[in-house]
Image (spheres, rainbow, N blue to C red):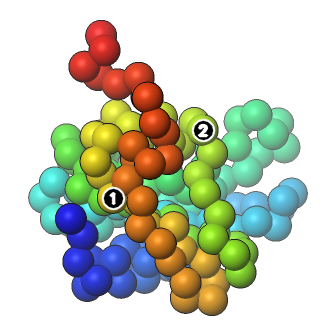
Amino acid sequence: MITKAQIRKLIQTAARARRRAHAPYSKFHVGAAVIGGSGKLYGGCNVENASYGLTVCAERTAVFNAVAAGEKKIRALAVLFHSTRLASPCGACRQVMREFGKSMPVVLANLRGGYRVRTVDDLLPDSFGPEDL
């Protein structure tokens, strides 16, 4: 369960991170934020590379920032896309999110202030996770 106040804070953190995105090729600036198990917020932005396959999405950057800071649990994630419609994370990001639980809330937000909340399981049904090892 995620509160409206948490959603607002996640989207605000994602918006700040989005302003730091490095997207010289696609011009598609994305920001993301997670709430760690400690309750602390961590942001991330997409970082493109001239060797396109080495680009890293905002969602993974936010998760990796939280883990690098010592978080073992991710409570929720928000992603703010450079779009007026509600987009959705790529498959690689969905799989990284899955590592932290199928029921984790994921907030999908756009530049018009719209958002919707899904779970990782909604985004990646029948997924492979730690319990499958």
Q: Residue furthest top?
A: 133
Question: What residue is at 76 percent from the left and 34 percent from the top?
Answer: 53
- Using the rendered view, name the quadrant where residue 26 is placed: bottom right
At label 1, which amino acid type do we have? Pro
Q: Amino acid at mark 2?
A: Gly
The residue that mark 2 highlights is 91
Residue 74 drawn at (x, y percent): 26, 50
Dot 1: what SS? strand
Residue 120: mark in rendering = none
- The C terminus sits in image quarter: top left
Q: Is residue 14 visible?
A: no
Q: Position of residue 100 (x, y in %)?
A: 29, 40
SS type, badge 2: helix
Badge 1 density bin: few <14, some 14–19, many ≥20, Cα 10 Å: many
Q: Residue furthest left?
A: 38
Q: Position of residue 15 (x, y in %)?
A: 52, 79
Is residue 34 in view? yes
Quarter of the picture containing the N terminus is bottom left
- Residue found 24% across the figure and 70% down from its top: 2
Between the C-alphas of marks 2 and 1, the distance is: 16 Å
Q: Is 23 positioned to the left or the right of 116 in the image?
A: right
Residue 113 spot, x, y in % from top left = 55, 88
Name the residue beneath numbered marker 1.
105
Q: Is residue 70 above or below residue 14?
A: above
Vertical order, 121 against 19 (above or below): above
Q: Earlier in the sequence, mark 2 or mark 1?
A: 2
Mark 2: give few (<14), some (14-19) or many (20+) Cα within 10 Å: few
In depth, the one of 13 and 84 nearer the eye is 84
